[in-house]
Amino acid sequence: ALKDQAYVDSYIADVLKAKDWINTQLKKYQIRHHIDGGNYFLIWPKHSPKEIATKLRNKGILIRSMSGKPLIDKSIRVSVGTLPQMQQFLQAFNAIEKS
């Protein structure tokens, strides 16, 4: 796949669109977050990061708890994916946060 430059360029464009979309949605839902130049973003959920990670894993979504890490304690790290993946993540995350 890496030898197919058109595929790589298309995938990167898709992920950048998804990153913009998730940033807009996190602002819309007033979810505390940090998103910058990397391929991930951080969210500070209302519930325990470990609880969020477990519940998302049960739904087939893998994220990382950043609990105990200086400056980002009590946050979760989410890798940016495609728009459908980000939509799936946000729907599952919101359902957990509302419960």
Image (cartoon, rainbow, N blue to C red):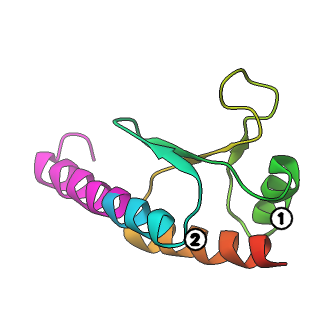
Query: Can residue 82 be seen in this snapshot?
Result: no
C-alpha distance separating marks 2 and 1: 13 Å
- Within 10 Å of disc 2 (Cα), the crowding (few <14, some 14-19, many 20+) is some
Q: Amino acid at mark 2?
A: Leu
x and y percentages locating residue 73 in the rendered image: 74, 32
Which residue appears at 80% of the width and 58% of the height?
52
Residue 13 lies in the magenta-colored region: yes
x and y percentages locating residue 88 in the rendered image: 56, 74
Residue 9 lies in the magenta-colored region: yes
Residue lying at the far top in this picture: please name it.
70
Q: Which mark is residue 97?
A: none
Residue 29, by quadrant, is bottom right
Instruction: State the residue position of label 2.
Output: 90
In the displayed structure image, the side of residue 60 where residue 86 appears, left or right: left
Q: Is residue 25 above or below residue 44?
A: below
Principal SS element in the magenta part?
Answer: helix
In the displayed structure image, the side of residue 19 where residue 13 appears, left or right: left
SS of the residue at dot 1?
helix
Chain part drawn in magenta: 1-19
Q: Which one is nearer the viewer's eye here, 87 or 67? A: 67
x and y percentages locating residue 93 in the rendered image: 68, 69
Instruction: State the residue position of label 1.
Output: 55
Which residue appears at 19% of the width and 55% of the height?
7
Q: Amino acid at mark 1?
A: Lys
x and y percentages locating residue 56 in the rendered image: 75, 63
Q: Which one is nearer the viewer's eye here, 25 or 50? A: 25
Residue 67, by quadrant, is top right
Q: Is residue 58 above or below residue 3?
A: below
In the displayed structure image, the side of residue 70 where residue 15 appears, left or right: left
User: Which quarter of the rendered picture does the C terminus lie within?
Assistant: bottom right
- Within 10 Å of disc 1 (Cα), the crowding (few <14, some 14-19, many 20+) is some
